[in-house]
Every structure is written in C-alpha cells, then in structure tokens.
Amino acid sequence: MATDIDVAALDPAATAAAGFASRYGTAPAGLWAAPGRVNLIGEHTDYNDGFVLPFALPQRVVVAAGPARAGWQVSSDTQPDPVSFGDAEVARPGVLGGWAAYVAGVVWALRDAGLPVPPARLAIASDVPVGAGVSSSAALESAVLTALIGLGGLDLPVERRPGIAQRAENAYVGAPTGIMDQAASIRCRAGHALFLDCRTQQVQHIPFDVAAHGLAVLVVDSNAPHRHVDGEYGARRSSCEAAARLLGVPALRDITPDGLDEALHRCADAVMRRRVRHIVTENQRVLDTVARLSGGRIREIGPLLTASHASMRDDFEITVPEVDVAVEAALTAGAYGARMTGGGFGGCVLALVDAARAEETAAAVEAAYGARGFPAPTAWVAAPGPGATRL
Ligand code: GLA
C-alpha cells in the first residue's frame, strides 16, 4: 500500500524508555501503554447513554515512569519543551493549558477521586496519529492514568478508570466528550471489539478476528482539516440533550425504534428530528452489529456500517466531502461496508474489505482524492489490539 503507515518502524516503547533515560539520567521504573481506537459503529451515542462498539488500534501512547521527590515532570517525544507542575496546578481544573493539561488533568481527577497520586517523572512517546479522530488524547490520558496507578500501586478497579480519564478531559481540559474513547483505550482486548453500554458501563468483549475470516479493516485517514469540531460537537450534544428533555426521557437511549415515529412527531424542529433519528437508529445498528458478529456473520455487518455513514451524513450532519468520497470510493471498490469513524468533521473512515483487496481499496480512495484535488489520504490495516497495559 503506497500510503501505508509502517507501524513497526515507529517504536514508542523504545522511544519513551530512551527519552526517560536521557532526560532523567536513570532507567524508568516501568513502561505503561494505552492505545488509540477506531469505533466500529455507534457514533455520538455515548453521551446519549447508548451503545458503542470500538476496538483498540495497535498504535499507542507509551509512558515511561519513575518516582520523584515532589511534583510531576513530563517530557514528550512530540513536544519541544518538558513541563513541570506541582500541587498548585492540580488543585483545581484548568490551571495548566496545552498538551500538559491532559497529564495534569489525570493527576487532578485521580486526586479528586481521593487517590494518593505518587510524585513522578514521566517520558511520553506515541505513534497514535494526532488530529485523525482516533483518540490520541484519550490514549494519552489513559496511558498516564495507567502509569500513575501502576507506579503508586493505587487501588482503582478497571471499571472506574475510564470515568476518571474522562473527567480529566471534560473538567480539566474542557472538552465535553463522552466515555467511549477512554473506555476503549482502557478496556479493549486484542482480537475483540468492545461492546459498551454507556449507561451501565457494562462491557462485553465481542470476538472480531477479521483476519481469520479473510477480511481486513482498512482505516483511511482523510487528512481533512478538522472544521469547527469543538463547537459542532457541543452543538450536537446540546441538541440531543434538549430533545431528551422535550421527550421526557433521561437520555435519547430511552427512545426505542418502536417509539421513534411518535418521538419524531413530538419534535417540532426539523434539525432536532434528524438528530434524534440518528441516535435511535444508530443504537439499534450497534445492537444488530453485535448480533451479527456474535453469530460469526462478519461480512453481514457491512450494510450496517454503510447505513451508519448515511445517517451521520444526512441526519447528524457531521461528515465532510473528504470522508464521503472515501466511503463512496471504498464501496465502489468492493468494500462490504464503510463509514466515517469518530466525532466527525474530518478524521478517519473505516472499510470492511477482503484482506486481499485492502491495497486495491486504498488505491481507489487515493485515486478518488486525486481526481477531486484533495490532499492524499493515509491508509493502514488495523487489527484489534489490546487495551491499556504495563509492558
Ligand atoms: C469523540 C468523543 C467520544 C464520542 C465520539 C463520537 O470521539 O470523544 O466521546 O462522542 O466523538 O462517537
């Protein structure tokens, strides 16, 4: 594949360990890693108390960590300047800005949950693409969280960890995201997709060994500039919450497909009707996808993926021409199904393809981009990797 990212060529574990040694003059006490994710299906359903089905990417953030006398020192392979902070910066949310906010936010959220966070020196390295909609920020939060828990021997059950990482993002960094990304980064298992009920936080690991079925998930980064992503995300969330209030339910999760027509009838606003329809139908598509995967019918999830894309494009209105073109080109090249994955307004598309046709499909998308004068996309085949772990 001409546009392949050579994952093996980048080794964040070695980079983090070397970064630690050169910065602090000693070896780290350990290395902890947490992956980025792609979401197979279930978009914008998480903050509606609904269902999602992400899987972990092989790309990950690695944190080399060791003890310190006081405070936190952090360096990153992608940032020119290391950052140090102490109690003042983690006394309340938002004191520190920039990339280090993701680290300080985790320290703050852990402490806020009553946990004795150890002072630490950290060196971070990552091969998770940034700005591609594959959750590089959740991977960073989850890796730092896992490292601090490991270093300090903190007692925090795995089910509670995503919520703490999400608080770092919501309250400290200030992004109103749902629980999916941190849950995926922390709780995914290799060879599986994570079926998460975002209301109860219950998970089921759904076998998703595409290679065993002669299939591949092709991920195509549209490389489209993210447009108005923060404001639009917040607007979608507000609209869903307003709809739930209007319909008298705790969250849109509580509207079932059977009750959809009646719910739509009660929404006077056409935009709100479209938002509601996306969430209700998307939740059902997640359930249908899980049923097909559980029955070993992997190819048959294709139409659900494609229907999800149409719903994001027409009802939730979060796609951009680059991702629509990538989906169309992949389908024309024979993909079983394709959809944008992640929050929207750019980012990545995933396509379920015969493994032998992955390269051809990537080339077809690239050709379609060339024909429209879009910058070249980046594509790679993603096998479901493990969640956060000590290396
Ligand atoms: C972003 C958010 C998630 C989720 C997705 C959309 O990735 O961080 O919480 O809402 O968008 O599904």
Image (tube, rainbow, N blue to C red):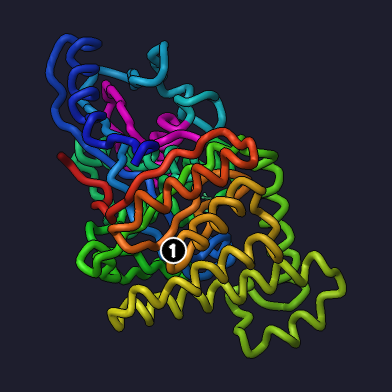
The quadrant of the picture occupied by the N terminus is top left
Position of residue 120 in the picture relative to residue 80 (left or right): left
Position of residue 321 in the picture relative to residue 286 (left or right): right
Q: Which residues are magenta?
A: 102-131
- Give the residue furthest to the bottom: 258
Relative depth, front residue between 195 and 97: 195
> Which residue corresponds to mark 1?
335
Position of residue 46 in the picture relative to residue 129 (left or right): right
Q: Is residue 31 magenta?
A: no
* Relative vertical location of residue 386 with respect to residue 275 in this rendering, above or below: above
The quadrant of the picture occupied by the C terminus is top left
* Relative vertical location of residue 2 with respect to residue 220 in this rendering, above or below: above
Q: Position of residue 61 (x, y in %)?
A: 31, 35
Element at label 1? loop
Q: Position of residue 99 (x, y in %)?
A: 47, 26
Task: Identify the residue at image location x=49%, y=52%.
Answer: 349
Q: Position of residue 130 (x, y in %)?
A: 46, 34
Q: Is residue 108 magenta?
A: yes
Task: Identify the residue at image location x=26%, y=21%.
Answer: 121
Residue type, numbered disc 1? Ala
Q: Position of residue 50 (x, y in %)?
A: 52, 70
In the picture, residue 150 is in which quadrant?
A: top left
Relative depth, front residue between 190 and 74: 190
Relative depth, front residue between 84 and 183: 183
